Amino acid sequence: MSAVPSATVDQNATLETRLARFPAQQIWPASQRAVSYRDVDSAESEALPLVLLHGIGSGAASWVQQFEVLGETRRVLAWDAPGYGASTPVEADSPAASDYATVLKQWLDALGIERCVLLGHSLGAIIAGAFAVANPQRVAGLLLLSPAGGYGASAAEVRETKRDQRLAMLKELGPQGLAEKRSTNMLSIHASGEAHAWVRWNMSRVIPHGYAQATHLLANADLASDLSRYKGRISVAVGAEDTITPPEACERLALAAGTTLQVVPRAGHAGYIEAPAAYTAIIDTFCRASDGQRSQ
């Protein structure tokens, strides 16, 4: 195994120090089911809470830069999805988006959050979309960043191939190997060394069983179908240099949602990590516009 460059170690240490301001918490919203999450609560704020859902190779910690800025004006929460961090996996080996959306509802219920702005990145967008369709009264605004559409509408052969390729890579490489092999794909050529280090750090901490379940979710899901049925406030954004969920794929999802696509220059798939100022501004603008939708 190659040695970790000292610069990467220093970058990780800096980010972990920043992350320590927002320690991991755990709650048991249902019998035998835990959800781990991070939370910054602006007690004086009357703004709606912002709930952040990460992608397949990430976790709650990835949102530290958004916590630092957006947490000044509103409550900001990020979960570790079922099977990630200390969160209990969903029961099904090959789950549907509704399985995760049910846990999301239980978590928000346990925290007393009746209405929020909901943000999903990549695979998190699939969960966010399923939750919004099932619980439209709970969502004042749905913001999707580089959304993954899923393969649920594809032919069975395509779904199985996509699923099996990712599962084989997980089995061969493990989380650390995935982080080394896949993390660069998450970013544009403009990303800093710190952004690369942070993406690797988060990806190396995925749990194989949870990642495998999320791989099945990706194969089973059809986000476009959910978005076509959702009538609430929605916005979609993607990095101009995203090669995982490229702009043309996100454009199709934006059309299904009846909205326009916002393209962020010089940003890849994990744009909120590599271009935090641009993405945090997008999130803040959307949240402020959604605050007027406190009730239906």
Image: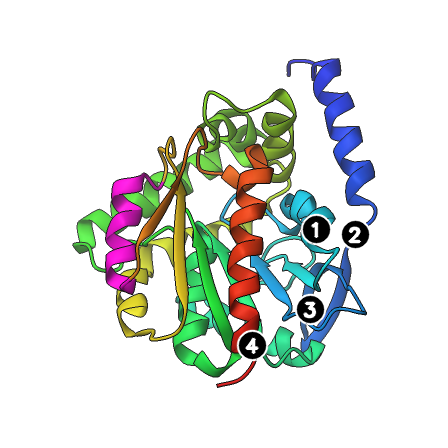
The answer to the question of whether label 4 and label 1 lie on touching residues, with beta carbons closer than 8 A, is no
Q: Image check: 108 left or right of 132?
A: right
User: What residue sits right under mark 3 in the picture?
Assistant: 34
Work out how far the residue at label 4 is from the one at label 1, CA to CA, in angstroms. Answer: 22 Å
Would you place residue 90 above or below residue 206 in this image? below
The answer to the question of whether label 4 and label 3 lie on touching residues, with beta carbons closer than 8 A, is no
User: What residue sits right under mark 2 in the picture?
Assistant: 22
Q: State the residue in front, 182 or 177.
A: 182
> Residue type at mark 3?
Ala
Answer few, some or many: residues within 10 Å of disc 1's Cα (few below 14, many 20 plus, some between 14 and 19).
many
Q: Residue at x 50, y 73 (%)?
A: 140
Q: State the residue in front, 167 or 294.
A: 294
> Residue type at mark 4?
Lys
User: What residue sits right under mark 1 in the picture?
Assistant: 67
The answer to the question of whether label 2 and label 3 lie on touching residues, with beta carbons closer than 8 A, is no
Magenta segment, principal secondary structure? helix
Earlier in the chain: of badge 2 and badge 4, it is 2
Q: Is mark 4 on a helix, strand or loop?
A: helix
Q: What element carries label 1?
A: helix
The question of residue 254 being in magenta is answered with yes
The answer to the question of whether label 2 and label 1 lie on touching residues, with beta carbons closer than 8 A, is yes
* Nearer to us: label 2 or label 1: 1
Q: Which residue is drawn at 64% across and 47% down?
A: 63
Answer few, some or many: residues within 10 Å of disc 2's Cα (few below 14, many 20 plus, some between 14 and 19).
some
Work out how far the residue at label 3 is from the one at label 1, CA to CA, in angstroms. Answer: 22 Å
Q: What stretch is highlighted in magenta?
A: 245-258
